[in-house]
Amino acid sequence: MGRTMIPAQTPTLLVKIFGRDRPGLTAGLFETLAAFHVTVIDIEQVVTRGRIVLCALVSAPAGGSGSEGELRATVHGWAEGLGMQAEIISGLGDNPARGSGRSHVTVLGNPLNAENTAAIAARITGCGGNIDRIFRLAKYPVTAVEFNVSGVPTERLRTELATEAAVRSIDVAVVSAGLSRRAQRLVVMDVDSTLIQDEVIELFAAHAGCEEKVAEVTAAAMRGELDFEESLHARVALLAGLDASVVDKVRAEVRLTPGARTLIRTLKRLGYQVGVVSGGFTQVTDALAEQLGLDFAAANTLEIVDGRLTGRVTGEIVDRAGKARLLRRFAASAGVPLAQTVAIGDGANDLDMLNAAGLGVAFNAKPLVRQAAHTALSVPFLDTVLYLLGITREEVEAADAES
Ligand SMILES: [Mg+2]
């Protein structure tokens, strides 16, 4: 048999059926068409609240207009008998190929309103994009829909939609279509205010009674006003003399971000490797890595001598540049090209890592970080990252049900 490409001048028919869904409809339509020995070129079927739209693109029957007329009458008769509407449109060849510049656009709303949906669609069209397909990824914990868009370069579309998203306080992520999205295999996360809701140094500071002083320095560092390493040393110095037993207390106080377990469990089941890099401390991140089954973890280490914190850190400092370096190291160790990595973080010290990754996700981040990252999430659920990767809620739940 030869290749089944349909020549552009071949007469074809688009057969569209619309109405209440019921078992056996698809079989019924194709049984009806089978009598005319047509070739199936394309099929799309969507069911929304019990209503089905079934489109079949088929070759026109051999035998000319007489046979085509007979096909039309037969399909209409079949559909009417079921209380369905049918439409049959003559044309030539296959669907036109999708334009170049293909992107996946994920829109998250909590809730997603019609006005924002209209604005996103208008922006896509306004910059020359064509919406080829739309479907829902999730209804929980937020509404997530994906638009498949062609005809406009991904970078251009990302810039256009980022502007719209910022104005409307919704989350929109634009990633290039193609194999790289399917090949993403390593996710690396920041810890403080990303994987967990807390800033670990502030938990330590509360035990040292210097909470406010530390919080001030942290905030300035995260806004990018202070060099991270300087601020780290300044804050850790405030902890000097604390009893080492405080480490266990802090570990017990850490609160995971909602959706963190779902995100990690789902990624692991889908074969991703997952790591954390933190400007915080190995005394806490190693325990988290163990508890969550992470593949990689790196952070600073609080020096403890004679059962007390010295107010110093030991080893290689994990700062802004260090986080990006560690992402590269984890990627090399996992055998994953950098372009196929995903990084998630909220602070200015995450920016190098977010930009080095194939997809950088600013998670409930400061404005500076939001603007510089590939994409931003402003809903407080970490599992919504899955939707940016094109993983649907149904897939998450199916993976849970299997184990
Ligand atoms: Mg952070």
Image (cartoon, grey):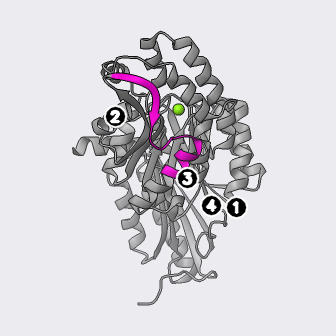
Quadrant position of the N terminus in the picture: bottom left
Q: Which residue, given by chain and number where applicable, does mark 2 sit on? A: 288
| Of 401 and 297, the residue lying toward us | 297
Q: Which residues are magenta?
A: 308-326
The reply to whether dot 3 and dot 4 touch (C-beta < 8 Å) is no
Q: Amino acid at mark 4?
A: Arg
- Label 1 residue SS: loop
Few, some or many residues within 10 Å of mark 3 (<14, 14–19, 20+): many
Q: Residue 151 — which label? A: 1
Quadrant position of the C terminus in the picture: top left
Some atom of ligand 1 lies within 8 Å of the CB belonging to the residue at label 1: no
- Tell whether position 120 is magenta: no
Residue farthest to the top, as pictured:
209
Question: Which mark lies nearer to you, 3 or 4?
Answer: 3
Residue 255, compared with residue 119, is above or below; it is above
Q: Which residue, given by chain and number where applicable, does mark 4 sit on? A: 102
Residue shown at 49% from the left, 51% from the top = 327
Question: Which mark lies nearer to you, 4 or 2?
Answer: 2
Q: Residue 264 — which label? A: none
